[in-house]
Image (tube, rainbow, N blue to C red):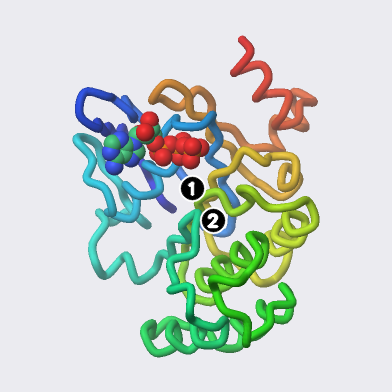
Amino acid sequence: MIEVKSIRKRFGRKHVLKDVSFTAEKGQITCLIGINGVGKSTVLKAIMGLTPISEGAIRIDGQPVSSRLYERIAFIPDAIMMPPGMTVDACVRFMADYYASWNAKRAEELKGFFKLNGRDRVGELSKGNAAKLNLLLGLALDVDYVLMDEPFSGIDMFSREQIASVFASHLIEDRGVIITTHEINDIEHLIDKVVLLENGVVRREFDTETVRQEEGKSVMDVMREVYRG
Ligand SMILES: Nc1ncnc2c1ncn2[C@@H]1O[C@H](COP(=O)(O)OP(=O)(O)OP(=O)(O)O)[C@@H](O)[C@H]1O
């Protein structure tokens, strides 16, 4: 389980995260939702140790984060980090050489699933295919947790649907996933838990199935209640 406990983060005088606490379980998809600029990416970067936090604690399976624990988490940023001149296959080879946890079989499966052409260069990929390659590079790592920052941002409906279908497939296995998104419609039926952020705090944290069964509400219904008041 990833535990985020009362984290605070300031950029200059701006308090982006005032007091954020939530948990994300292994084997579940947890979705971090909030309007632009609310601090979703900052939370993911804080978990990965990419941005220092002013206060609070982050634990992974009960342990404070450490470089050894980071080998068990993959972070998929909102844009691909590979050089534009590299081909899809060269990116895959680079990852295989660099990461001991690289799963070549899953990488090949994902390449087929997303219909990516190994000879295409990163800089020439459509937005949708770049997002798919980005996802492949993170999901092919044998890690316990995967953090994805806005995997649907700026891509067409068909690519979004294809990406969403990965979440329902065996390619996710029993890993814990934290995803940030605005495009809740595409994955509403696939997510286990929602964390709604607003003004630097968690406004609501809930299990989607519980809310569906006990309150008869969808994630969108709860979002409307919270954000429209
Ligand atoms: N390195 C930085 N220096 C200064 N301010 C920053 C920095 N990184 C983020 N911020 C500010 O912190 C706030 C939260 O940013 P963040 O990217 O976490 O939000 P977000 O919810 O992920 O937004 P979006 O949905 O647009 O991706 C924003 O106001 C942003 O301008």
Q: Is residue 147 left or right of residue 105?
A: left
User: Marks 2/1: CA distance?
Assistant: 8 Å
Rendered view: 134 above or below 206:
below
* Count of numbered marks: 2
Cβ–Cβ below 8 Å for labels 2 and 1?
yes
Q: Secondary structure at mark 2?
A: strand
Q: Is residue 221 left or right of residue 46?
A: right
Q: Residues within 10 Å of mark 2 (few under 14, many from 20)?
A: many
Residue 21 in sight in this render: no
Mark closer to the chain start, 2 or 1: 1
* Ligand 1 location (quadrant): top left
Percent across and percent down for residue 39 are 41, 35
Percent across and percent down for residue 211 are 70, 30
As drawn, the residue found furthest toward the top would be 229
Q: Secondary structure at mark 1?
A: strand
Residue 195 in sight in this render: yes
Q: Which amino acid lies under the numbered mark 1 shown in the image of this protein? A: Ala
Percent across and percent down for residue 53 are 23, 40
Q: Quadrant of the image for the C terminus?
A: top right
Quadrant hosting residue 139: bottom right
Residue drawn at (44%, 72%), measured in percent from left and top?
82
Q: Is residue 15 left or right of residue 35?
A: left
Residue drawn at (69%, 71%), measured in percent from left and top?
170
Q: Badge 1 is on which residue?
A: 24
Residue drawn at (31%, 32%), measured in percent from left and top?
6
Percent across and percent down for residue 13 are 21, 23
Residue drawn at (49%, 58%), measured in percent from left and top?
79
Q: Badge 2 is on which residue?
A: 177
Please tell me which residue lies in front, 229 or 115: 115
Q: Residues within 10 Å of mark 1 (few under 14, many from 20)?
A: many
Q: Which amino acid lies under the numbered mark 2 shown in the image of this protein? A: Val
Please tell me which residue lies in front, 189 or 2: 189
